[in-house]
Image (cartoon, grey):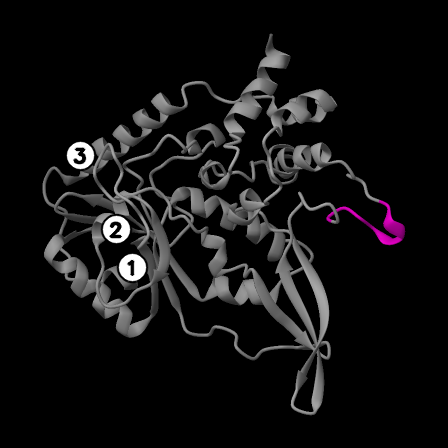
Amino acid sequence: MALYFLSERNINPWFSLLGERYEVFTPKYSAGDTQNGASGQKEKTIFSSYEGKIDWTVFSQIRSSNPLKEFFFLAREEVARYFKGNKEGRERKVRVIIGAKACDILPLRVHQKMFILKDFSDPFFQERFANTIVFTTDCPKPRETCFCNLVGLSPNGAAEVDGNITPLPDGLIIETFTQRGEDLAKLANWESLPPGYSEKREESRKKAERLLTEINPKPFSKNLPQILGKEEEKEFWEERKKGCVECFGCLFVCPTCFCFLLTDRVAKFGREEEFRRIKVWDACYMAQYARVAGGLNARPRFYERFRNRFHCKFMNTYYDFNFFSCSGCGRCFNVCPAKIDIREVLGRLSERYEE
């Protein structure tokens, strides 16, 4: 809708105003982060609540360590008591999230498809989504773990949200896409975009894209979904999963994973007991994930469950929605003890069928 410039001196006053009116969340440098040996700068960030002051240089870093889905698709939540809809504790105050990256927004599209736009609508997800304003920020410094360019994304924000911010050395360029985003931006003591700043933004964006191309020069095969449908060889997947200790970290940190499990529990309160239904994240690497009544299991061997993850993200979702359910954020590689790299697995797979 519009472009604004927020100079460095006006950034914290803007956040202070937002904090008075909304529940605000931004990335912060992790307290346990150590300085990067090459740059001498802290780089690890986590999403957390705004507490009165922000180090706005955090917007120049890559995505946070924790996925954005934690705000919408909770790891654990109570969904019913005595099978009556549980409305207690639902978040009704409008939340503002500033600092998400493009690789956080594609996962929201996946979750919208699963929890809002299909036959089933999850009222908990729907309410949180409707009551959240999201601003992305450009990602000017992609790292070796990033590969959003291989899955059709750009490091430069996302138009599917309320607004986007481009960090520059002396301030922020704010672009709004919705009326909610416009209202938020107008709370700032903004200025008109100074001469030459559109060009500065464009150069920053092109530099990020060039860097990503250098990191990931070879694209995935255009026939990746079809190739995955052909590849059933046990030896290939056994080789690729070597080193995996089945910690499930890659699945729990993945921003697109949407599987959940419902459990029924009896909770005691004083002399009374209540029957509660709890929803928790599930993981397709778990041995019991595909088990059905009678003990039958469609994927009893781990290599089959390992393969299923790739089928889900790069074949099944593509056929259902015409996009991959992987955003190239690299979080899975960061947490993996064996450093299993999606790019290496899919690259080897493509080579087998393109030779």
Which residue is denoted by mark 2 in the rendering?
2
**Residue type, mark 2 in image:** Ala
Q: Is residue 97 above or below residue 317?
A: below
Kindly indicate the quadrant of the structure image that contains residue 210. top left
Badge 1 crowding class, 10 Å Cα cut-off, few under 14, some 14 to 19, many 20 or more, is some
| Residue at x 86% of width, y 49% of height | 295
Q: Is residue 21 above or below residue 254?
A: below
Per the rendered image, the range of residues in magenta is: 289-296
**Residue type, mark 1 in image:** Glu
Q: Position of residue 55 (x, y in %)?
A: 21, 55
Q: Is residue 86 above or below residue 223?
A: below
**Residue type, mark 3 in image:** Glu
- Front position in the image: 27 or 39: 39
Which residue is denoted by mark 3 in the rendering?
199
First along the sequence among labels 2 and 3: 2
First along the sequence among labels 1 and 2: 2
Q: Secondary structure at mark 1?
A: helix
| Residue at x 31% of width, y 26% of height | 211
- Front position in the image: 261 or 19: 261
Q: CA distance from mark 1 to mark 3?
A: 22 Å
**103 left or right of 289 in image:** left
First along the sequence among labels 1 and 3: 1
Which residue is denoted by mark 1 in the rendering?
182
Q: Is residue 180 visible?
A: no
Q: Position of residue 336 (x, y in %)?
A: 51, 38
Disc 1, disc 2: CB below 8 Å?
Answer: yes
